[in-house]
Image: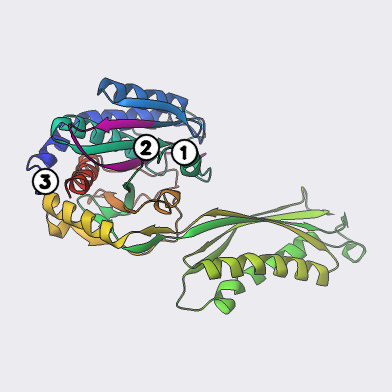
Amino acid sequence: MPLPSDLREAAEEIGPGVVADRRDIHQHPELGYEEKRTAALVAARLRDLGLSVRTNVGGTGVVGVLRGGKPGKTVLLRADMDALPIQEENQASYASQHPGVMHACGHDAHTAMLLGVARVLADRRAQLAGTVKFMFQPAEEGGAGAQRMIDDGVLDDPPVDAAFGLHVDAERYVGQVSVRPGPSNASSDRFTIVVQGRGGHAARPHRSVDPIVVGAQIVTALQTLVSREVSPIEPAVVTVGSMTAGTTFNVIPDTATIKGTVRAYNEDIRALVQERVGELARGIAAAMRASAEVDYRVGYPVLTNDPEKVELVRSALSEVFGIEAVVDRDPSMGAEDFSFVLQRVPGAFMYVGVRNPAWKVPRPVHTATFDLDEDALPIGVAALAATALKFLSE
């Protein structure tokens, strides 16, 4: 069944409201599981549209249910609401008003766009064959908010038949939407290694066991896990993001703490690296007269898009925007907790270009200067709305 011919125009028409919501949320960012103001705004918007609303799902999550005028399947659409602990450096009128907290990953845009989708689809509820469930989740940034909402029943009553979501893409220009079948985002695990040495005077290192030197050897050795123990044709990343030790120049401390992340696309490689991080850390520490405690935490799984649902997305987007707007996405080592949803129901996750063509350099996510071209917001609205309608019409 063809999509409504005015779908893109409908998204453009409500564009100013979507922009206003995005700016409001951007000015008032909230960290994971603290999204009370954002959740209240979302719940109020959904109730105004006549949706059934459930709050405090998985913490601060919100679920809205739109029942169509005809029976049919149930599709879930998702947006994340949390911000990051970053001090914004942009001077825009809508810059963050909360010191040290910023929407640096586009979750403000995701939330505003999904609210726009709810409005577009609510206007068509009489013709809608089935049910649309809107999932506004907390704590995507490391807090596994999607899993907590699943545990709290977001995929039940009514049971979800397919799920779709989107993310902003700061590398691609406005007007482009990308998606790929199969693995699209890597798994994400984290580790903390505490090296226990013996402190002392910096002038007499032979009477101490320097945990900084031991830690440096561990950091160097960790880089060989990918280069020498993982097949060159298999993607994997081991990154140490923090090493802390000591307080001054002339004292050898007792301990050094190393923190890092592991990314992979293959569960066997994921398990191998987990085992080897501990073996390397403990072995090197023991060889240098120290000891090492390793806390390894398994995090988000690989995000895997269902190939049939990817084809559905491509068909819907091509119908609305033209085939030239739909591009193939390269695999990303970034993690995404929508993967928990796609472990349980088939679906797909797409990326919407938000880079202004006039920007000479991109404004990447997770930086203090991240921003997006708001002309992309109606595109995201139309993309998700078209996908939902295409699925329900089949």
* Residue, far front: 71
Q: Secondary structure at mark 2?
A: strand
Sequence order check, earlier mark of 2 and 1: 2
Q: Check if mark 2's residue and mark 3's residue have beta carbons within 8 Å.
A: no
| Residue 108 in view | no
Distance, label 2 to label 3, CA atoms, is: 23 Å
Observer-nearest residue: 99 or 129? 129
Observer-nearest residue: 299 or 207? 299
State the residue at coordinates (38%, 44%). 370
Query: What residue is shown with label 2?
Result: 135
Give the class, few, some or many, for how many residues have Cα within 10 Å of label 2's Cα (few <14, many ≥20).
Answer: many
Distance, label 2 to label 1, CA atoms, is: 9 Å
Q: Check if mark 2's residue and mark 1's residue have beta carbons within 8 Å.
A: yes
Q: Secondary structure at mark 1?
A: helix
Q: Quadrant of residue 64?
A: top left
Query: What residue is shown with label 1?
Result: 149
Image disc number at residue 3 = 3
State the residue at coordinates (32%, 37%). 133
Give the class, few, some or many, for how many residues have Cα within 10 Å of label 3's Cα (few <14, many ≥20).
Answer: some
Sequence order check, earlier mark of 1 and 3: 3
